[in-house]
Image (tube, grey):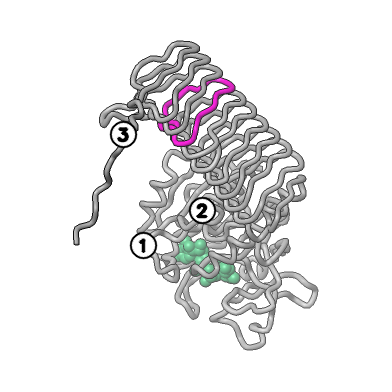
Amino acid sequence: MRLEVIILAAGEGTRMQSSIPKVLHTVGGRPLLDHVLSVARDLKPEALHVVVGRSGADVRAYFEGTDVAWVEQIEQKGTGHAVMQAIDDVESSAMVLVLFGDVPLIEKVTLEACISAAADGIGVVTVDMPIPDGFGRIQRRSDGQIEAIVEDKDATPAQRTITEVNTGILAAPAAMLVRLLESITARNAQGEYYLTDIVGLAASQGVRVAGVDATSPEEVQGINDRIQLASVERYMQRREAERLMADGVTIADPSRLDLRGTLVAGQDCFIDINVIIEGVVVIGDNVSIGPGCVVTDSELADGVVIEAHSVVEGAVVGANCRLGPFARVRPGTELAEGACIGNFVETKKAIIGAGTKANHLAYLGDSTIGAECNIGAGTITCNYDGVDKNETHIGDGVFVGTNSTLVAPLTIDEGAYIAAGSTITSKVDSEDLAVGRARQRNIHGWVPPTKRK
Ligand code: UD1
Ligand code: CA
């Protein structure tokens, strides 16, 4: 059956106290709406309608160029009114799934169950909330059939004691939805067109309304303020950490790992505390990431060890490389097998050969460095002349002495030596020793200045 999804995201989100639209606030590094769109797309719908309000321009701009069909709801007259704005764009033969843009952790299995439940009526995702305040209550007949959803503000004291609540997520055939929406009114405590009113109407007409249990209250937690945002974030992080552990990654403390993107990991990897993973990170087997590291959009091959407090971004790191502690590996870095980038070493657009070591205090930018080189402490590639970035090319087996200044553009051929403390401005041939510094003078009989009285 044709499926179309309507995502409601027109609410003002006043309790966020923010100039950013609520659905652009992030969980796991991605906007709330992006999470909802992802799970919706997993259901392979024919269309994705998103209802936004007056401040929807930023939301549209963020998702520009995607498969979303935008609908504007100028005045927020309730969830039923919001669905009405989109329903004209929906094919009458379709099954409609309604989602909220601020409920980011909803899972595919729950939605599939909700759609199946709507095959012969309406499917509603419900959950048991020990403290149901603020939610619509699920009212069931004595035979267990759902009879109505009563909003908190309209509920009697007896109805308020019901702990089964409406998550807001429901599915119904489009033609039925259109017919039911035509009959709802705004005669209620909030003066709004409640989507939930279709449930009572349908039930009274003999339509079957089936409840589907959410897997947990957290899955259907909506976000209205930054406290809920933080609690959803922690829950999502826990869930992601558990997935990784189930796949064979050891995590020192699942409450101190932050995944703001996706991590694909091999077996027997170890992630220490306070690590942040951003973008798409792919790691092989036996990779170890030390405490306090930030790894963004990078690939780490088998056996890579990143020691404490290193920042690695946009890098391809070969097998058994060692980075850090305190390494800064910037975009465009490619390290061949067994290379070492040690403490206080920064690399950028640096292609570094197998077994090459830059163990301490260096800057290697716009550089190609061969295999088995030794880059001494304090080596700086001077890649920027104030206008252009220039390249440094270093062959295999080059020894660069400490505190060397390599002024690009520059080529150092294989097997060359650079004497410590040199400033190198022109090409060094293979096997040569380049000395680019003033010769030492010792002044005999030098009289140090004496203090005046
Ligand atoms: C709604 C449900 C309630 C349920 C609760 C779960 C209704 C009438 N009530 O209540 O039964 O327990 O969610 O969190 O549906 N929105 C629009 N346009 C509007 C109004 C809302 O797009 O005019 C969007 C909001 O952006 C939000 C969603 O719909 O994503 C829910 O709106 P909200 O005001 O939070 O609904 P509740 O009153 O919490
Ligand atoms: Ca809400």
**Residue under the point 41% across and 32% down:** 380
Q: Residue at x 76, y 45 (%)?
A: 247
At label 2, the amino acid type is: Leu
Q: Position of residue 287 (x, y in %)?
A: 69, 40
Residue drawn at x 60%, y 34% as measured from the top left: 299
Question: What SS does tag 1 mark?
Answer: loop
Q: Is residue 222 above or below residue 131?
A: above
Q: Nearer the viewer, mark 2 or mark 3?
A: 3
Residue 159 placement (x, y as % from top left): 65, 83
User: Is residue 344 rendered to the left or right of residue 234?
Assistant: left
On residue 443, which mark appears? Answer: 3
The local secondary structure at tag 2 comes to: helix
- Tell me, yes or no, whether the two marked residues, 1 and 2, touch with CB atoms within 8 Å: no
Q: Quadrant of residue 297?
A: top right
Amino acid beneath label 1: Ser
Work out whether residue 130 or residue 167 is closer to the camera in this orientation and state it.
130
- Quarter of the N terminus within the rendering: top right
Residue 413 versus residue 344 in the image, above or below: above
> In the drawing, what numbered circle is on residue 115?
none
The first of marks 1 and 2 along the sequence is 1
* Residue depth check, mark 1 versus mark 2: number of the one nearer the observer: 1
Residue at mark 1: 19
Task: State the extent of the magenta-drawn residues as a range.
Answer: 363-381
Visible in this render: residue 93? no
Q: Residue at x 52, y 38 (%)?
A: 360
Q: What kind of residue is marked 3?
A: Ile
Q: CA distance from mark 1 to mark 3?
A: 69 Å
Q: Secondary structure at mark 3?
A: loop
For residue 360, above or below residue 40: above
Residue corresponding to mark 2: 33
Find out whether residue 379 is within the magenta segment.
yes
Residue 408 is a magenta residue: no
